[in-house]
Amino acid sequence: MSNRKLLIVSAPSGSGKSTIVNFLMTEHPEFKLAFSVSATSRPPRGKEQDGVDYYFLSAEEFRRHIEADDFLEYEEVYKGRFYGTLKSQVEKKLAAGMNVVFDVDVKGGINIKRYYGDRALSVFIQPPSIEALRERLIARNTDEMGQIEQRLAKAAYEMSFAPQFDRIIVNDDLDVAKQEAVDILRAFLQDGPTTLGEQDS
């Protein structure tokens, strides 16, 4: 069995999760991180490539994998539209000597942590407040106000799961949050979960 480890990163939309994951992968090659590519039953969009952006499956194929217990976690977002993480893809990366990083929703993150236990570190990226998140989403200028309010309601719900994660990083200042993520991950990869200090208050 590989002694490689797993990093699970979850957060409400707009919290800077993908930015922090991309930073860890591009700026810190010493962590040997491989990104976990999700499977989906939706068709590719634009220039999306199978095996790079997602593993594209038909709804029927996806259901067969569910029946075979092939997923670490999955969700039917709405009828016939599935997203999930295939165990085989993760195991392949671990066997190749990589540490695997997941950028997943809150419930998926909790399920993956439950499956891998101490081999996985789960990190929740939290906005300083719902009000700060509202300002960020408005500044992005990509959503109507109605959509923003829906996202904020979902964010408040997702933040209620934060205590179930190993560590919480409050992303008030992105550079500080990035450095905190580096320090937490370095300690975890070197020493394992038992020697991690208490969360900074």
Image (spheres, rainbow, N blue to C red):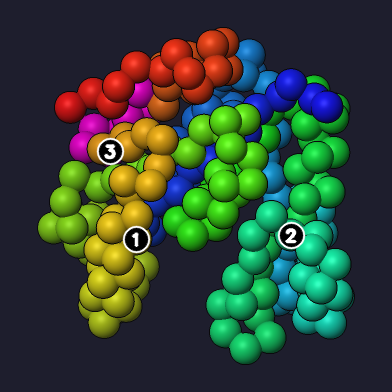
Residue occupying image coordinates x 35% and y 23%? 180
Which is more N-terminal, label 2 or label 1?
A: 2
Q: In this view, does 194 lie above or below 44?
A: above
Residue 111, label in figure: none
Residue occupying image coordinates x 32% and y 30%? 177
Residue occupying image coordinates x 38% and y 58%? 13
What is the span of residues highlighted in magenta in the rendered image? 171-180
Labelled pair 3, 2 in contact (Cβ < 8 Å): no
Q: Residue 52 in the image: state x and y as whole percent.
A: 76, 50
Mark 2 neighbour density, 10 Å: few (under 14) some (14–19) many (20 or more): some
Q: Residue 84 in the image: state x and y as whole percent.
A: 67, 63
Q: Which of 200 and 13 is in front in this view?
A: 200
- Circle 1 residue: 158
Q: Is residue 84 left or right of residue 64?
A: left
User: What is the secondary structure assignment of the residue under circle 1?
Assistant: helix
State how far apart marks 3 and 1 are (Cα).
Answer: 15 Å
Q: In this view, does 34 lie above or below 46?
A: above
- Circle 3 residue: 171
Residue 198 is a magenta residue = no
Q: Residue 163 in the image: state x and y as whole percent.
A: 31, 46
Residue flagged by tag 2: what amino acid is it?
Answer: Phe
Magenta stretch, overall SS: helix
Q: Is residue 9 left or right of residue 163?
A: right
Residue 33 visible here: no
Mark 3 neighbour density, 10 Å: few (under 14) some (14–19) many (20 or more): many
- Circle 2 residue: 71
Quarter of the rendering occupied by the C terminus: top left
Mark 3 or mark 1: which is in front?
Answer: 1
Mark 3 or mark 2: which is in front?
Answer: 2
Q: Which of 199 and 35 is in front in this view?
A: 199
State how far apart marks 1 and 2 are (Cα).
Answer: 22 Å
